[in-house]
Amino acid sequence: MLYSKEVMDHFRNPRNVGEIENADGIGEVGNAKCGDIMRMYIKVENNIITDCKFMTFGCGSAIATSSMATELIKGKPVEEAVKITNKAVVDALGGLPAHKLHCSVLAEEAVKAAVKDYYDKNGIAYDQEKYKQGTWGHDHN
Amino acid sequence: MIYLDNAGTTRLDDQVLDKMMPYLKEEYGNASSLHTMGQRAKEVLDDARERVARCINAKAKEIYFTSGGSESDNQAIISACRLGERKGKKHIITSKIEHHAVLHTLEKLEKQGFAVTYLDVYEDGIVKVEDLKKAIREDTCLVTIMFANNEIGTIQPITEIGKVCREKGVLFHTDAVQAVGHILVDVEKMNIDLLSMAAHKFHGPKGVGALYAKSNVLLSNLIEGGAQERGKRGGTENVAGAVGLAVALENAVADIDKVAQHEIALRDKLIKALLQIPHSALNGDKENRLPNNVNICFEGIEGESLLLLLDDAGICASSGSACTSGSLDPSHVLLAIGRPHEVAHGSLRLTLSKHTTEEEINKTIEIIPGVVELLRKMSPVWDQLQKGARKHVI
Ligand SMILES: Cc1ncc(COP(=O)(O)O)c(C=O)c1O
Ligand SMILES: [Zn+2]
């Protein structure tokens, strides 16, 4: 098998698929050219991510990592959620084949992008450097 | 399980295996040995060579057994270029949609100072003979254009290409790995100088193929060693494999029209049904196409996830998406026929065989629309298309 049981479970039964109307933050990363796009919606109450949904155009590992990422950040304070790394997502899935790791980077980026959008919308200050487009380690030209 | 990946490889025929078995078991002699058992193996090998030759209208001494399509492609191209080089000719013409066995060999030659012209295949996936005529130069030593494409199934105008090459005195190689055993090949009539084939694409064994080289074309070795294959490929001969190749090819050629008819009926039914799915498109020309090839793009979805879901539903298929190839770019073939990247990622290849049944095709037609819809529902690209934030391209 290309993927572990855990990955296939999240691929076959993705958690939190869909849209959140009136989301507090929306992040979209990747591009259709490279074959992976991830869109993440977050709902924030009292600085806690109370709901999170995603839509993904991509391969099995892109869908599975999106799904796992939503599970990992739900219920977390925003500052904590944003610290999620793609490694943490991949580990939670029990690993990915080496050539598939690049597809998982998007999950981390999507969370960051959604949080950035939330900060922007609410006038919350943050370290601009950390959220600059293109520093998210996913280069797809 | 519904197996629709016959361009990837095919099921070995039981009857072919039966004919191979004696040479894996009791008749295990080395065809280079002088003793009786060795000499019997040599006779069997020569007989296989004769039979393979007959299937493509070649002479037995023009057939060299190899490990398969890739090796045949490598040796054909490198041999032609070594011959060209000696006369100061270092230009090669090919198409943009060749198999990597050809393209990567050419890239290697480019690093060695050869110039390569990559002919366009336009939207229909077919090279224009006029373009070829214009591309041929004084220093062209080789034209290598595949007989039929492995992804989109398009069949190239091989007879016309061969004619042009012969007139201009340029060697012509064709990667016929997807064509041999599926459409009739006549190396004489088609003016082919070098041709590659692989047994596993027509119900023969894996790891064995042949290179046809016209008697006046001197081959260079890829593998140095003993005097096997008239000194052009070292290594103890794969007698059972050669027998398997010969038997499978004879069977395929004997039934070629019958199988083609069967496949075309199912292929066209499948194409028609899948094109009912909104924003889908057939890749490659509808007419000049292998009898068993269906290749369709679905907008808004990605190929690998489509394959995984089809696999869950019991359908074995293939795709040209980047994520199935392990690279960031989708299939060079789909890009060459003008599909934008995002559409090329959503391609599905279904390739039939003589074993494919109408029932299997009906089941496939039932399953695919639902899977496409499921993936579209979670796709931000499809969402953008629906909301008009992105323009449909197919
Ligand atoms: C057109 C074409 N050329 C070459 C090859 C390589 O053949 P093989 O796998 O036997 O080396 C293939 C098979 O994948 C093919 O489809
Ligand atoms: Zn991917």
Image (cartoon, grey):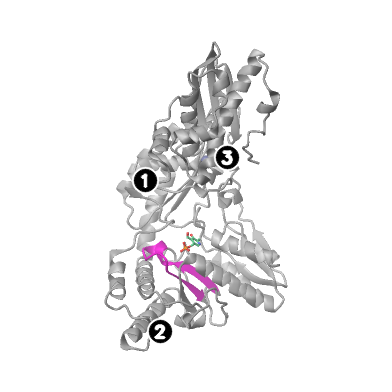
Report whether residue B192 is seen: no
Horizontal arrangement in the rendering, residue B255 relative to residue B198 (left or right):
left
Q: Which dot marks residue B315?
A: 1
Q: Which amino acid does label 2 sit on?
A: Ser
Residue A38, picture quadrant: top right
Q: Name the residue under label 3.
A: B342
Q: Is residue A101 left or right of residue B170?
A: left
- The question of residue B203 being in magenta is answered with yes
Q: Distance between the residues labelled 3 and 2?
A: 54 Å
Which chain letter goes with mark 1? B
Residue A125, horizontal then vertical, whole percent: 68, 16
Q: Is mark 2 on a helix, strand or loop?
A: loop
User: Most extreme residue toward the top, as rendered?
Assistant: A46
Q: Where is residue B181 in the image (x, y as percent from the top left)?
A: 41, 66
- Chain letter, disc 2 residue: B
Provide residue B30's location: percent of width, then percent of height.
Answer: 37, 81
In the rendered structure, which disc, 3 or 1, sits on the residue that comes first in sequence? 1
In the rendered structure, which segment of residues is drawn in magenta? B194-212
Q: Nearer the viewer, mark 1 or mark 2?
A: 2
Q: Mark 2 points at which residue?
A: B32
- Badge 1 and badge 2 in a common chain: yes
Q: Which of B288 and B87 is in front in this view?
A: B87
Q: Do labels 3 and 1 share a chain?
A: yes
Toward the viewer: B234 or B185? B234
Q: Closer to the camera, B66 or B29?
A: B29
Q: Is residue A47 above or below residue B278?
A: above
Image point 59% across, 61% down: which residue? B104
Mark 1 belongs to which amino acid? Ile
Mark 1 secondary-structure assignment: strand
Q: Are the residues tagged 1 and 2 within 8 Å (C-beta)?
A: no
